[in-house]
Amino acid sequence: MTFKEKVTDLLNKGLEEYPNLFLISLSINSANKIEVIIDGDNGVTLQDCINMSRAIEHNLDREEEDFSLEVASAGATSPLKDPRQYKKNIGRIVNVKTNDQEIEANLEDATNDVIILEWTAREPKQIGKGKETVQKRLELPYTEIKEAVVVIKF
């Protein structure tokens, strides 16, 4: 078993113990620097990061393989990557980039395949001059999303 396989196995076992947490990314460079980014259905606490760190670190032998370990939560401004991240942000405003457009809209719903966005736009009137406010709705598959970020407003 390679070092990366061992770390991945330990991380998966740790995540099984805490089903509200999920993996966003795992990277191990050539110097055995392990970087783990996690998120949770109810957010991530410092204790969650400690628990995941312990699940990995306490089961690896530094005598066998030297390594450094960093476990962090996905930041508030980090792009959304996992369907579970979209689901926990239903009701919030997101900025979504696709190949054709960039939309700032309310995240109405998220399934395992698509997200549903709703927003208002000012468009030219069908009849006459001027503009009118129109309610828009879009069902967007994850495969078409280049990047999506939760918009934080104060």
Image (cartoon, rainbow, N blue to C red):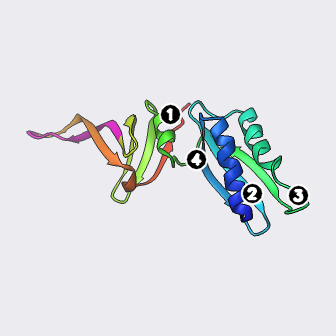
For disc 4, the neighbor class at 10 Å (few under 14, some 14 to 19, many from 20) is few
State the residue position of label 2.
34
Q: Magenta segment, which residues?
A: 116-128
Task: Give the amino acid type for the residue marked by disc 3 in the picture.
Answer: Arg
State the residue position of label 4.
78
**Magenta span: helix, strand or loop, mainly?**
strand
Dot 4 or dot 3, earlier in sequence: 3
Marker disc for residue 62: 3
124 to the left or right of 14 = left
Question: What percent of the width, then of the height, locates residue 112?
Answer: 40, 43
Dot 1 or dot 2, earlier in sequence: 2
59 to the left or right of 141 = right
Q: Nearer the viewer, residue 97 or 126?
A: 97
Task: Give the amino acid type for the residue marked by disc 4 in the picture.
Answer: Ser
Magenta highlight on residue 96: no
What's the distance in space between the residues labelled 1 and 2, CA to CA?
A: 27 Å
What's the distance in space between the residues labelled 1 and 4, CA to CA?
A: 14 Å
- Please report the residue visible at 68 percent of the width from the left and 60 percent of the height from the top: 5
For the residue labelled by badge 4, is the local secondary structure a helix, a strand or a loop?
Answer: loop
* Residue lying furthest bottom: 30
- Please report the residue visible at 56 percent of the width from the left and 33 percent of the height from the top: 41
For the residue labelled by badge 2, is the local secondary structure a helix, a strand or a loop?
Answer: strand
What's the distance in space between the residues labelled 3 and 1, CA to CA?
A: 37 Å
